[in-house]
Amino acid sequence: MARGKKQAELTLEERLKEALVPEEEQPYEVPGNWVWVKLCALLNEIKNGTTVKQDKNCKGYSVTRIESLQHNTINFDRLGTIIDESQIKQTDWYNEGDIALSHINSVEHVGKTALINEDMLPLVHGMNLLRLRFNKAFLPVLFQYYSQSYQYKTEIISRINMAVNQVSINQKQLGMLEIPLPPLAEQQRIVDCVASLFAKLDEAKEKAQAALDSFETRKAAVLHKAFTGELTAKWREEHGISTTSWARKRFDEVAEIKSNLVDPAQYSSFPHIAPDNIEKRTGRLLDYHTIAEDKVMSGKHRFYPGQILYSKIRPYLSKVVVVDFDGLCSADMYPITAKGDIVYLWYCMLSEDFLEQASSAGSRSVLPKINQKELSSLQVSICSLPEQQEIVRILDDLLAKEQRTKDVCIEVLSCIDLIKKSILAQAFRGKLGTNNPTEESAVELLKQCLAQK
């Protein structure tokens, strides 16, 4: 293009050349009847939002804010409002099919989009979001899918302007974004195919999330059955044992709380366990360091293999673990020795019954804490040692299966987003099996739109 030559003075061929991405700059190969184009060639308009003063706590005309764009849609709980309609220009309103794009945000969120549908209207285009209005060469919903792809995010990041607390991408930088343009019929087929596949994945995600959310409920139910004798009803029948063997006893009748403060300087290589090293409500020990590594100075409790460590701070968090090694624990924890089966007592302490008692018994309201006297008075359900051991065996098996189910759910949830990215990568390479190579090239579609500019 000749320097200084206005767009209106360009011939159709010159405009087409300017719109197409040179072959050497194309990110990857696409089908023969597709073309790579610059985003600006597919837009009738790209516009900044209005800067009219907003108030999210008043009734008025809904207006998008930077925080209202979440999860690739508009969160209506985070819209602002404009009270005076006279401040709103006709050009400030969204139309159905517009794209709202976050162009000032963190690196993670810049470039995110939302497709405006009829149900969202009337809606005002607010500041810190760009409004993209596409011409007839490109389906807005297809761009919405493309904006969720790895390729798009990579290209956005390569163009952003860095600042101290946020990044941005301006209209010119965004307009030069490379977009794979299929024929119009193929665009619709891609949209239909991706929508169908995503719907199935979202259904799987909902089921996996529901199973994950119910994990604690299922675990609590299993523990309840264990400590009401329901899990071992058949075992007692087989062994001729009556339910009268069960009793409610004080904690200090079935366990000993060992206070054994020592000078940590004498145990520098020993493991150091604090409440933060125990996962809440699971009984799982997290990563920990030695006394020396944590630079421990104050007195700590000495503990031994086969003891339970229980956090007396915030008892509602239910931080309790069985250890199989020597070490020192925080003074905010109790080392506990069981008079019966240690694992049985540990499971008891993880139960909802014990948690509720401990949470209500704890003293102090600012930083809840259960003291030794309060812990000693809590009630636990106790049976004979052989039945305790049978309960532990059953619980180990059942809860291990539940944990495996939980792990699978977590894995499914982590994979679904990756699967979606893979689908989008295939979609925008023409590899979904929907492309018809005999259809007219997208170049002709692009020419028609350029001719109307």
Image (spheres, rainbow, N blue to C red):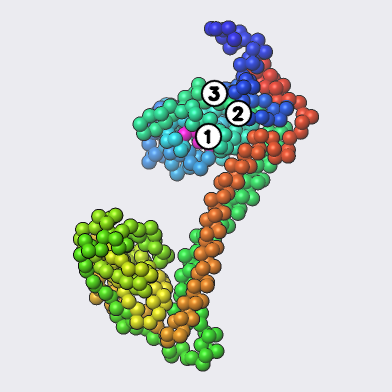
Query: 273 or 206, which lies in front?
Result: 273
Q: Label 1: state its secondary structure.
A: helix
Q: What type is the residue that disc 3 sits on?
A: Gly
Inter-mark Cα distance, 3 to 1: 14 Å
Relative height, residue 189 to residue 287 (above, below)? above
- Residue 158 placement (x, y as % from top left): 49, 29
Nearest to viewer (mark 2 / mark 1): 2
The percent coordinates of residue 381 (x first, y second) are 39, 81
| Identity of the residue furthest to the right in this view | 438
- Residue wearing tag 2: 27
The answer to whether residue 274 is visible is no
**Label located before the other in sequence (3 or 1):** 1
In which quadrant of the rendered image does the N terminus lie?
Answer: top right
Which of the 4 quarters of the picture holds residue 77?
Answer: top left
**Which label is found at residue 175?**
3
Q: Which residues are magenta?
A: 110-114
Three-letter residue code for mark 2: Pro
93 lies above or below 240:
above
Q: Which mark sits nearer the N-terminus, 3 or 2?
A: 2
Q: CA distance from mark 3 to mark 2?
A: 16 Å
Percent of width and height locating residue 18: 61, 16
Quarter-of-image position of residue 307: bottom left
Earlier in the chain: of badge 2 and badge 1, it is: 2
Which residue has dot 1 on it? Answer: 153
Q: Which mark is residue 194?
A: none
